[in-house]
């Protein structure tokens, strides 16, 4: 076994840190989409800061959610689509104004 020295700790003795995760709420689920929004914003961590974890947690809730488009409403009211393949986050794109109006009507 090889031990490597890293800033004052042997790698196998490094202190573990609890990873913070963004909190989210499911606002709406339809046949074709899921809308989520931030909840419990702690230390400034939002869905945009932690999309990989959020996508995997939404995917783990129910398999049928993984085939629906996933939209995120940020604290400013803007919508973004979280692209994914299975339970893996692939990218983020801001929604057009017409899509924003459509999504706002759905959750009103």
Image (cartoon, rainbow, N blue to C red):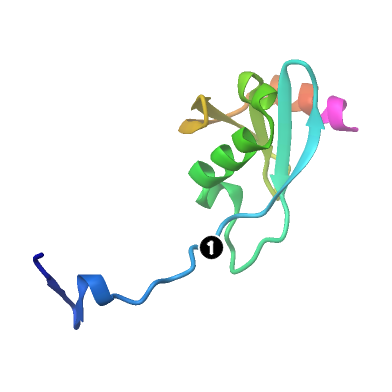
Give the farthest residue toward the right: 108
Residue 11 image-quadrant placement: bottom left
Magenta segment includes 66 = no
Task: Report how many numbered discs are placed on residues in the image.
Answer: 1
Location of mark 1 (residue): 20
Residue drawn where x is 71% and y is 39% of the image: 36
Q: What element carries label 1?
A: loop
The region drawn magenta spans 104-108
Position of residue 50 measured from the top left corner of the image (x, y, whole percent): 52, 50
The vertical placement of 21 against 73, above or below, is below
Position of residue 85 measured from the top left corner of the image (x, y, whole percent): 48, 23
Give the farthest residue toward the top: 31
Screen quadrant of the N terminus: bottom left
Position of residue 102 measured from the top left corner of the image (x, y, whole percent): 79, 21
Residue drawn where x is 68% and y is 26% of the image: 65
Front one among 51 and 64? 64
Residue 45 image-quadrant placement: bottom right
Side (left or right) of 20 relative to 107: left
Residue drawn where x is 56% and y is 57% of the image: 21
Position of residue 4 measured from the top left corner of the image (x, y, whole percent): 12, 70
């Amino acid at each position: 076994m090889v031990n490597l020295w890293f800033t004052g700790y042997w790698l196998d003795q490094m202190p573990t840190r609890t990873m913070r995760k963004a909190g989210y709420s499911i606002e709406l689920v339809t046949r074709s989409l899921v809308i989520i929004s931030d909840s419990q914003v702690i230390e400034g961590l939002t869905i945009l800061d932690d999309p990989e974890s959020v996508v995997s947690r939404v995917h783990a809730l129910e398999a049928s959610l993984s085939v629906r488009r996933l939209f995120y409403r940020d604290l400013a009211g803007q919508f973004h689509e979280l692209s994914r393949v299975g339970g893996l986050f692939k990218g983020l794109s801001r929604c057009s104004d017409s899509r924003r109006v459509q999504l706002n009507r759905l959750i009103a």
